[in-house]
Image (tube, rainbow, N blue to C red):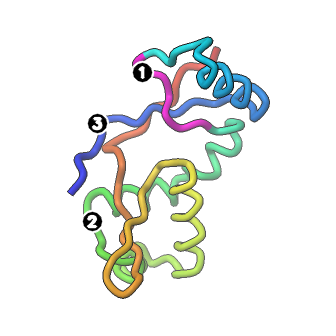
Amino acid sequence: MKKLRKKLKIGIMSREEFQRYTLAIAKGEIKPKPGTPKVWFESVESMAQILSTKNRALLRIIREKRPQSLGELQALSGREKASLSRTLSKMAEYGLVELAEGPRNSLIPMPVAESFEVAPFI
């Protein structure tokens, strides 16, 4: 099993700023410093939606219980499977969880970090 990061750093940057930032990295104009966020949200609002209280509880279940399928996670969380699938897909897009392929095309939600830290606003 993949080792969890202790902390996953999260940043907030507009889409336009993020495009300029990643282009500058690709061109070698800047080099990300150690501790630079690995996950970026476009706004505080989008971060709050993905990291809502309900979704943080879901991440905690994934980290602590290590469910081996969405069905098992559904039973542990009490959330509807369709909603759970959408939420996990969105979290995976942001790099907050990984969805590994399990037996018979099942998806296994995997934690990526023990905790999250939001980078200070500049």
SS of the residue at dot 3?
Answer: strand
- Near-viewer residue (119 or 28): 28
Mark closer to the observer (3, 1):
1
| Residue occupied by mark 3 | 6
* Residue ID at (55%, 64%): 89
| Mark nearer the N terminus (1 vs 2) | 1
Place of residue 101 in the rendered image (x, y in percent of width and height, measured from the top left): 38, 72
| Residue 111 image-quadrant placement | bottom left
The label shown at residue 35 is 1
Is the residue marked by circle 3 packed among few (<14), some (14-19), or many (20+) residues within 10 Å?
few
Amino acid type at circle 1 is Gly
Image-based side of 16 in relation to 82, left or right = right
The label shown at residue 66 is 2
* Viewer can see residue 76: no
Q: CA distance from mark 2 to mark 3?
A: 17 Å
* Residue ID at (58%, 16%): 28
Place of residue 95 in the rendered image (x, y in percent of width and height, measured from the top left): 49, 48
Determine whether 19 is above or below 49 in the image: above
The reply to whether the C-beta atoms of the residues labelled 3 and 1 are less than 8 Å apart is: no
Is 101 magenta? The answer is: no
Place of residue 44 in the rendered image (x, y in percent of width and height, measured from the top left): 67, 36
| Residue 85 image-quadrant placement | bottom right
Image-based side of 61 in relation to 3, left or right = right
Place of residue 118 in the rendered image (x, y in percent of width and height, measured from the top left): 51, 30
Question: What segment carries the magenta color?
Answer: 34-40
